[in-house]
Structures are given as structure tokens and as C-alpha cells.
Image: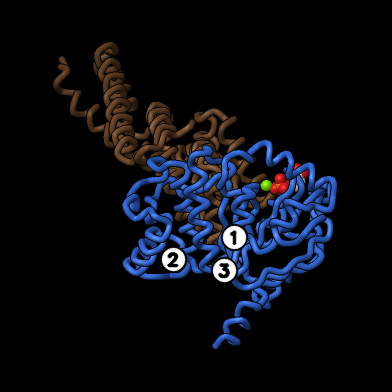
Chain colours: A brown, B blue
Amino acid sequence: MVSVVDYVPYILEGVLWTLGLVGGGLLIGFIVGLPSAIAQVYGHRFLKIMVEVYAWFFRSVPLLVLLFLFYWGIFPALGFKLDPLTCSILVLGIRSGAYQSQIFRGAITSVGEGQYIAARTLGMSKMRAIYHIVLPQALRISIPGWANEYAIILKDSAICFTLGVMEILTRTRYVVMATLEPLIPYFIAGALFIVLTYSGTKILNTIYDKLKIPGLIWRM
Amino acid sequence: MEDVESMVEDEIVLKVEDLYKSYNNVIVLKGISFEVRRGETKIICGPSGSGKSTLLRCINLLTKPDKGMIWLEGEELTTRSININKVRQKIGFVFQEFNLFNHLTALRNVSIGLEVVKKMKREEAYKRAMEVLRKVGLEEHAHKYPAELSGGQKQRVAIARALAMNPSIILYDEPTSALDPQLIGEVLEVMKALAREKVTSIVVTHEMGFAQSVGDEMLFMYDGKIIERGPPEEVIHNPKTEIAKKFFERIQELYGREKR
Ligand SMILES: Nc1ncnc2c1ncn2[C@@H]1O[C@H](COP(=O)(O)OP(=O)(O)O)[C@@H](O)[C@H]1O
Ligand SMILES: [Mg+2]
């Protein structure tokens, strides 16, 4: 007879994998999403259209389809043999980039054109004005949206069990198969996601409050 | 000595010649020409939509004129090869809606141009920024953020931000139009002081008291053209056109009673 105590550490270890998926995905999403947003607001028409098509595609196709498409289709076709974890992080990241670009775009727009123009009239180049004036404010404004994105990608990451990534759900399923006892393991998995969602958003909201600009109320 | 001074005073800082600009087939500027000399305060007024902001935006290369030429200190700005960012360092711009950088203190609002554009060391930039803030009477508010300042204080920070760059000319686009009436005075005082120090400027404003006390020449714009020009008192009190006459009567009604 296998007891709860035996499989809890095994499931808990999945937290690291889940956090790897989420952290990697968010990071790649940031690296892709921020320049995409900048291109959408300040870029030339061609760039805008490219970003729009990218964001549209990754937001329209279900994550599961994307995972299979890239893992079984696109990466092998391009000659890459990626392990499930790497592939999952990449897909989560590129997809998150599509959503993050929308978050950042909204934030950049809400900073307003006036400050950007004012920076330009001082003689700052486009890039300098964006870097010194627009982004510091836009990134702050983005944090609540970003906290939401964290919660979403965290929950979505469970789908990576389909590629056998050793995250929380995959391990839980193995435990269920071994013990033939679904209730408690799945309950534990659910609880872990709740804890991760709650603590992550809490941290981000604390950061958001810390970074508030004195006297300023954001209109969003 | 006197001669040298008067020569310097006579120097043309800005020259605008036969400027045209249209937006979607609507001609907004229809052949604008004028000159601004060193130390001069040029007043521009005219009804809303007459093209005043567009003119200032053309001078600052925020928008490209269709035709005509602009020179700043002898350098033609309307050529393709012009370095926009270099030129803009020499032209201060003060907006109706202030456009302060919300995430920076008053001090940093003023110093950031010096740091990022003029590549000054931070301490040096702070020192200069503080000097300029003192000049606009905001030394003790230097460490406040824009949201913690009144409208009048914000606009004074914006003036300091422009002034700190030591520009050849400052363009003001209706700098007091967004302000509560009781806050207009403090901004006009600062602008008057600068005008008396011979800071070259173009001021788009409906403040007739200000125009008469420090304006050297007034241009009255209507429908994309300058239809009157001359000493402010002349243009205001003896306008030649019916349009200008009506306009000043209306201004008198709207703002007349408070003397500034
Ligand atoms: N970016 C723009 N696109 C289209 N039309 C514009 C633009 N900027 C100004 N205009 C038009 O040009 C005219 C002059 O505007 P503006 O220069 O702002 O006048 P003023 O500052 O004297 O009120 C107005 O009819 C305005 O609608
Ligand atoms: Mg205007």
C-alpha cells in the first residue's frame, strides 16, 4: 500500500518544473512581447502588420494545437530535435509574447503621446525617448496585466503534460496510475496551483505598489 | 561695445519663408513668412484652427512643411539632410498641456535632457537643473513629482525644462490656456522675466496684457495666413481687418476684466 507521504515529495518536485515552464515562458514572452509592442506603436507599417499577424495567429490557435504543431511538426521539419521541456517553454513563451505585446501596447498607449513628443522636442531620438520616458512608465502600468498573464500561463503550463514534461500534472497522473487513487493526488495538484497563483500575483502586486509614482493615479 | 551689442541684437535667429502645410488636402498654412531677431519676443494670436500650432510644429520639425523654408541661426532646417535631434536641442518647446515626465521629479524632468541629450554628468546636470528651477521659483519643489504640483507649477517646470537646454529660441504654444485663472499669473510672470532677459521666443497666446508688456511684435493669424502684424498695442487696439477687430473684442469679453 502506497501512502500519501510517499508521493507528496514526488509531486512537489513538479513545482520546480512548472516554475521553469512559467518563468521561461514569461521571460521569452517578455523578450518577444515588448519589442513587438514598441513596433506596433512606433514602428513602420510593415512592422506593425507583421506583429499583428504574429499576435493574431498565436492568440487564435489553441495551446494544445501549438504544442503539437511545434513539437511534432515545425521543429522537426526545421531539423531541431528539442526535448519536451525546451519545446514547451518556447511555445509557451512565443504564445505569451503575443498576449504580452497587447499588455505592453495598452500600457504604452496609456502613457500618452504628449510625453513622447516632449522628449523628442528636447532632442532625444526615438529610441531614447522610448527608453527613458515611455518604458519606465509603461512597464509599471503593465504589472497588473502581467500578473494576470502569470496566472494564465501558470494554469496553461499544465497542458505540457501532453508532451510528458515532468511538471505538476504529469507527476500527479503517474501517481494516480500507480495508486489507482485519484482524489487526493489531484486535490494536491489543484492546491499547488492555487498556492502558486496566489503567491505569484501577491508578489507582483506588492512590486506594483512599491513602484507607484507619488500622487499619480493611473487611468486604466 | 554698444555696436557689438546692437549687432548681436539684430541677428536673425529664426527665419520662416513662404511656409505651406496641408493635412489631407486641407491647406492649414498658406504662405507664412516672418523673422525673429535675437532677444525678441514674438507674439502670435488668432482664432482656433488658424494654424498657430501647426506653424510651431513645423519650426520644431515635428511635422514637415509642404513648401517653404525655415532657417535657424543661418542653418536651413527644411533640407533632407538635417539632423532633427541636433536642431531640436536648440529649440525649446512649451506645450499647452505641460507634458511633464510623470515618473520623474521636477529636478529630473529638467535634468534628463541635459543627461541624455547633452551628455552632462549627473551632478553637473542636477546643478544646472536646480539653477533653472530657482529661476522659475520652484527650488523647494525640486523633489516633487508632477502629480504633486499645481498646474502653474507644472508649467513652470516645463519652462525650466526647455530653458535648461539653453536653446536659441523657445516656442510656447498657448502655455496658459490649460490653467485655472488664478494660476495663470505665476506662469506669465516667469515668461515676462525671461522676455526681459532677452530670451528669444515665439509665444502663441491670448493673454493681451502679456503681449503688450513684453511682446516686440504681434502676428495675427487667420485661416493659415498672417493677416496683421505690428507692435502688439497697434494690432490689438487698431486692427486693420474686421476679423482681427472681432477677435480682439471677443478676447476682451472673455478675459478682459482681469488685468495681467
Ligand atoms: N495632425 C493633423 N491632422 C489633420 N489635421 C490637422 C492636424 N493638425 C492640425 N490639423 C488641422 O489644421 C488646422 C489648424 O490647426 P492648428 O494648427 O492646431 O490651429 P491652432 O493652433 O491655430 O488652433 C485645423 O483645422 C486642424 O483641424
Ligand atoms: Mg493650437
Viewer-nearest residue: B6 or B24: B6
Which mark is nearer the camera, 1 or 3?
A: 1
Disc 1, SS: helix
In this figure, which residue is indicated by the disc labeled 1? B214
The chain ID associated with circle 3 is B
Q: Which residue is located at x 41 percent, y 62 percent?
A: B132
Residue B11 place in picture, x, y as percent: 65, 78
Query: Is B161 left or right of B25, judged from the image as shown?
Result: left
Q: Are marks 1 and 3 on the same chain?
A: yes
User: Whole-Å distance between the Cαs marked 2 and 1?
Assistant: 29 Å
N-terminal of the pair, mark 1 or mark 3, is 3
Which mark is nearer the camera, 2 or 1?
A: 1
The three-letter amino acid code for the residue at tag 3 is Lys
Q: Residues within 10 Å of mark 2 (few under 14, many from 20)?
A: many
Q: Which residue is located at x 65 percent, y 47 percent?
A: B206
The chain ID associated with circle 2 is B
Counting labels gives: 3
In this figure, which residue is indicated by the disc labeled 2? B114
Query: Is B85 left or right of B165, judged from the image as shown?
Result: right
Query: Is A113 left or right of A180, judged from the image as shown?
Result: right
Disc 3, SS: loop
Quadrant of the image containing the N terminus of chain A: top left
Residue B159 place in picture, x, y as percent: 50, 56
Q: Which residue is located at x 52 percent, y 47 percent?
A: B98
In this figure, which residue is indicated by the disc labeled 3? B90
